[in-house]
Image (tube, coloured by chain):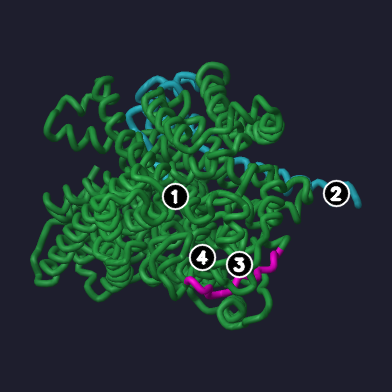
Chain colours: A green, B cyan
Amino acid sequence: MSTTHQQSAGAPRPAGEGRTDLPPNHVDPDVLEHEQTRWTPLRIVIWVGIALLGAVAWAMIAFVRGESINAIWFVFAAVCSYFIAYRFYSKFIERKLTRPDDRRATPAEYNANGKDFMPTDRRVLYGHHFAAIAGAGPLVGPVLAAQMGYLPGTIWIIVGVILAGAVQDYLVLFFSMRRGGRSLGQMAREELGVVGGYAAIIATLAIMIIIVAILALVVVNALGESPWGVFSVGMTIPIALFMGVYLRYLRPGKVMEVSIIGFVLLMAAIVAGGWVAGTDLGAQLFTLDRVTLAWCVIVYGFIAAVLPVWLLLSPRDYLSTFMKVGTIVLLAAAIVVVRPEITVPAVSEFAGRSDGPVFSGSLFPFLFVTIACGALSGFHALIASGTTPKMVEKERQTRFIGYGGMLMESFVAIMALVAAVSIDRGIYFAMNSSPAATMGTVEGAAAFVNSLGLSGVHVTPELLQGTADAVGEETIISRTGGAPTLALGLSHIMHQWLGGASMMSFWYHFAIMFEALFILTAVDAGTRVARFMLTDTLGNFIPKFRDADWRAGAWLTTAIMVAGWGSILILGVTDPLGGINTFFPLFGIANQLLAAIALAVCLAIAANLHRFKYLWIILLPLAFDVLVTVTGSWQKIFSPDPKVGYWANHFAFKDALAQGQTSFGTAKNVEAMEAVVRNTFVQGTLSILFVVLTIIVVIMAVVEAVKALRGHERRTHEDPYVESRFYAPSGLGATPSEKALAKQWDALPIEQRTPTGGGHH
Amino acid sequence: MSGAAQIPVLARVGSWWRGALRFGNGVLGADKYERYVQYHRASGCGTPLMTEREFWRDYQDWQEAHPEGRCC
């Protein structure tokens, strides 16, 4: 098969060499453009309507200051903005920057292997991609950011996704697709040279470790002292094992069937959790402190990563995907049906300060790192390169899957924000302030929250205890990490729609369950992916690591990865300053730095394609992201304010110890003070490592871009051109000429179509 | 309602349901064997066709060395 001939654009012509019997492999771009973007009276009416509704919704959120605001306006503002961004901005990027060519075969076509390289129907792939990128991240960040009021978070989630997050996902997906589905690390090495490439790989590994650690910390905080939660989440392990055995030996391939069985068992586990926690023995057995739980998660993580994939990891992934799509649809429907009234101020007292109890630091830059997933998430670049690009049928579909998929995740973040701000503000702060501030008691929490001097906030110990009782928990005080707050918000919304007050505790534990499920799936998969990255890198020096059958090597590298995130998890749960409050910014910064690396690689690629006039599409989010993360890291490293700066805190505690003090700040004894010294050292060191590696990568990318600008010619790293022997429409729907052409291809016998016959329905 | 009018409605609900099921199976990855069979036919049947059981075992073993990331 020829891989070199490249025709000029123009009229469609039959695909394939000398196979004039095949229909064309693309719709004439001019015809398509005309059909997609021509202004008909109906379209004008629809788009004016969307723009007006969006404008009204934004005005309601941003300017109208009544007693309360209805949550439905958040939905309208978000959805209308997404439609406009998708139709106009992503189309602009497609036309000017990516310029997809449907005559060109995708890796799914020319590398088809019936396994990972498989052309997949675009709508199915959209769902698949979304399920892979979305998890607990967009559910947790917005909850913590609600400390500053709903407006800053809402603006960043919506504007950020349009100009940054969705752009990153789309471009990484597109460029990786052009490169045979290569991973971000491989692309970095090709585009940025050895130094930039290794910096990118080390940064990616380190960032994955911190991200897994903080996600695990969120789970541990949600399950600590909660026998109900521990029982029902713990039951997911035997359920997954059962599903694995079922799929391996009893009825192989019946994935939907076993997922439904698993789902029913999961619901039963939630209900049973309530009974078990109600008995003395159950409460005794499953009330675990956070340190014990952290060790359980670490041991679990190691075992899950070395067990055969079919036994635990893959059935758990089916369950997680099944729950993900279901719960998100459920949550969206509930918000539309219930339309909760929101009484939280648009911009809270903490927006102008840097000493908020939920996370410390000023709005700029820390709001932008606290909400990472949902607005801009670097982690997505690992899915958008490597996994999804190997399944894309046609180049034009990347806009729908990459840009559109990220818009959906942003919508999840908006719903999480709505859930968080729909609960009472006093309860919100009682749940999210560190145990050092609330003393872990309802009286202490009430006193602390009332002392914050927030307008309209007055909580009583009875209210706090009553809320805990309503959701079937011992306590809701200092349940930091975002997951319990979201669960409370969700149960608050859901019980108004389904089940009434008696169902609140079910919905609370339902939410805890799915968050834990998403996170544990990400922990399993993250550990495995990181382990393979490590063996790959080590394999460059010690070839034996490349041998996939070498069990000792697999165990060793898994142990290294688990030790990496496990040690940070232990530091987090034992942190006298509250764990999440100090560690979460590190999670956000790490994720955003990964985004900077991904955007930097895209910048170098686009510059080498000589698309100089439109490089600003990448430079804009890259510059903002670098500004945010470098400022954030700078403050975390150099700020003299011990509430913000890791090192300032480190030296303050060190000095106190040197002076022989036995308590300092929130640390009540010498041991706690030593823990602070240790933790701030780790946090400060990681901050320096991340930011230095990222700056190296960004500088390398800018050097590459400038070289290209000066006319330095370089060979492309794109895979060679292969003429496509297949056709599929590009967007959610199909235009008339797309439909007509798809019909012609559908009429062909499967042997004459693409090597796979397509996953085309 | 007349019987003639009911059939198209039922047919439409049926086809909508089948579409939804196909979508769900696709997202979950439950249709992998079906698509492998298609792939096998389309690629010219160079190797003997695996049975469903063989295929899934082969796929699971392959997964062992090809981890797929899951995001936060």
The amino acid on which the numbered mark 3 sits, given as a three-letter code, is Val
Residue A744 seen in render: no
Q: Which residues are magenta?
A: A339-350
Residue marked by disc 1: A133
Residue marked by disc 4: A147
As drawn, is A522 to the left or to the right of A689?
right
As drawn, is A459 to the left or to the right of A560?
right
The N terminus of chain A is located in which quarter?
A: top left
Tell me how far mark 1 sits from mark 2, CA to CA: 46 Å
Looking at the picture, tell me which residue is in the foreground, A363 or A412. Answer: A363
Mark nearer the viewer, 4 or 1: 4
Mark nearer the viewer, 2 or 4: 4
Tell me how far mark 1 sits from mark 3, CA to CA: 21 Å
With respect to residue A144, does B4 lie above or below? above
**Extreme residue toward the front, this view:** A660
**Of the numbered discs in the image, which one, if any, rests on residue B4?**
2
Question: Could you tell me which residue is drawn at 32 percent across and 54 percent down?
Answer: A590
Tell me how far mark 3 sits from mark 4, CA to CA: 20 Å
Tell me how far mark 2 sits from mark 4, CA to CA: 59 Å
Residue marked by disc 3: A75
Mark nearer the viewer, 1 or 2: 1
The amino acid on which the numbered mark 1 sits, given as a three-letter code, is Ile
Badges 2 and 4, same chain = no
* CB contact under 8 Å: marks 2 and 4: no
Q: Secondary structure at mark 4?
A: helix
Tell me how far mark 4 sits from mark 1, CA to CA: 25 Å
